[in-house]
Amino acid sequence: MARPRNFTIEEAESSLLDVFWGDGYEGSSLRNLCDATGQRPASLYAAFGDKDQMYQAAMRRYLEWIDRQLTPAVDGADGVRHVLETTCRLTVEDRDRKGCLIVNSVGERENLSPQVNATVQASFDRLRALLHRQVHATFISSPPPDADEMVNLLMAATVSIRLLGRASASDAELASIASGAVHAFNRWADSSSS
């Protein structure tokens, strides 16, 4: 008869996320994952499967959290500001400067499964769709023809804040990227509306 689990999946996912987010996929040994969760390898394998599936569970947990953080209450120009300022705030508040699990995963693509790589791409696509929705909601009628270029600029600013935050850019530099992108967006939106 199998022994009952002495941990919850949610607690284990949270612990797995902490390890993978800080150490990356390759840097996270089974021993580290077991130490973080307080579980033996057999228990983790029984709950999640292999290391790849543990990473996927941690990514799902991260994506649920980051989606809640970045989704604005109102779409449009305020939504653009919310996404950029929230990205900056989350980066500055992270004193360990772990960066973004998704952005960090890009550097490990060759070591990740096709499923994880697909999740990474899908998360970038979701961020792009979120920014696209904010840009398009700014205009009463259809947005200007160069709206996708502005979405790309905002996407680049958002990702660079997370990447440069991990590279230890100063809080002021990160805030400058966020405010500069919001300012560029507002100037573009104003000139496009006139």
Image: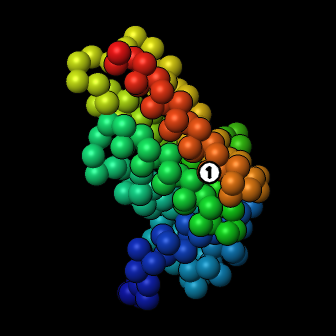
Amino acid type for the residue under numbered disc 1 = Ala
The residue where tag 1 is placed is 175
For the point 67% across and 69% down, which residue is it?
95
In the depicted structure, whether residue 190 falls above or below residue 95: above
For the point 36% across and 43% down, which residue is it?
78
> Which quadrant of the figure has residue 79?
top left
In the depicted structure, whether residue 27 falls above or below residue 167: below
Near-viewer residue (86 or 56)? 86
Whole-percent x, y for residue 41 in the image: 60, 76
Q: Residue 22 vs residue 122: left or right?
A: right
Residue lying at the far front of the rendered structure: 194
For the point 45% across and 31% down, which residue is it?
186
Q: Residue 187 vs residue 76: left or right?
A: right
How busy is the neighbourhood of tag 1: few (under 14 within 10 Å), some, or many (20 plus)? some
Q: Residue 99 vs residue 83: left or right?
A: right
For the point 40% across and 11% down, which residue is it?
145
Residue 181, can we see it?
Answer: yes
Residue lying at the far left of the rendered structure: 140
| Quarter of the image that includes the C terminus | top left
| Quarter of the image that includes the N terminus | bottom left
Say what secondary structure mark 1 lies in.
Answer: helix
Whole-percent x, y for residue 115 in the image: 51, 42
Near-viewer residue (142 or 162)? 142
